[in-house]
Amino acid sequence: LQLVHRILRGDFVWEEDAFVRAKQSFVQTQGEIQRSLEDAASEQLIAKLSGSDERFLSISKETLDHLTLEEVKRAVMEHLTTDAVEISIVSDVPCSKISTMLSSYLGSLPHTSRSSVMQKAIETRSIPDNEKLSELQRDFVFELEDTDDRAVAFLAGTCRSGYGFDREGRHITLGVGDGENGTTLGKLSVEDERRRHPLFAMAAHDLLQQVISRRLFTTLRERERLTYDAKFNFYNYDRLAGGWFTAEVTASPDNVDKALAVMEETLLAMKH
């Protein structure tokens, strides 16, 4: 509680040299992404899907150069407000002592709240949908100099978020247990109740990711001998409705088109 008290008060040491080192770390990370075939191709794919929305891409050196320590400090502190704090305590300490500590360390804090700009920025929204992509633009090739002669292919599309919402804000449980008089929780089946659990979609995503990745690897690597690696991933964001999925296969340039076709066939077969 002492630590929480100091955090909410903003008792930090904001050092300019530490800020410079942090920016250098981000620049290094972006350089590593651009030098990796898989990471660079994945970034290009997300850029296509999001309409080059910078929230989903690695931060550029130009953007970092425009950041100031005061701007970063203000952005951090606008998240650390008393109206956005939830305290959970699990301990063997008597409740009477905890009450005294809460009063001392949290009760003494002045009330703070998020600005209207920050509040608007964190509102739940949908993932961007790049509807401007034509049919020709939906298939694209990205080339990068690499030490090895290889290629990576992706299949991608939209999906629900980790909390079960599609980009229109409809939840996976929409219609579950609904009858003529609406939903009655007491009459839900075991399956319906399971689907209504807040973490159902997240657990389903984790399970699907493992199952599909294994199926792709088995088909493309063990059966067809086309690749050393194939995997399936979900891109989910806590405060955004909807998400993206990607299926990825790395192969030689001579085999990548065939590997892509087999990957698509495998996913379609699992759908049915």
Image (spheres, helix red, strand yellow):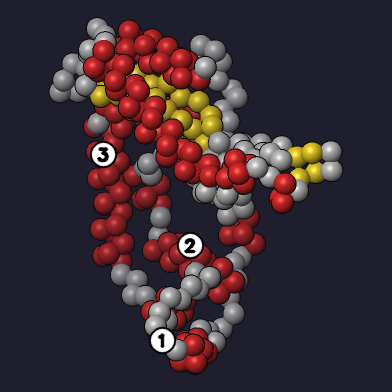
Q: Residues within 10 Å of mark 1 (few under 14, many from 20)?
A: few
Question: Can I make out residue 152 in this image?
Answer: no
Which residue occupies 39% across, 27% down?
212
Query: What number is the disc on residue 93?
Result: 1
Quarter of the image containing the N terminus? bottom left
Position of residue 269 measured from the top left corner of the image (x, y, whole percent) = 46, 15
* Residue 235 x/y as whole percent: 45, 37
Identify the mark at residue 65; answer none if there is no mark. none
Lower sequence index among marks 1 and 2? 2
In the figure, residue 154 lies in which quadrant?
A: top left
Question: How far is the residue under mark 1 from the one under mark 2?
Answer: 35 Å
Q: Tell me which numbered mark, 3 or 2, is placed earlier along the sequence.
A: 3
Cβ–Cβ below 8 Å for labels 3 and 1? no
Left or right for 74, reference 165: left
Identify the residue at image location x=48%, y=38%: 204
The residue tagged 3 is 31
User: Does residue 189 appear in this view?
Assistant: yes
Q: Is residue 80 above or below residue 121?
A: below
The residue identified by callout 2 is 75
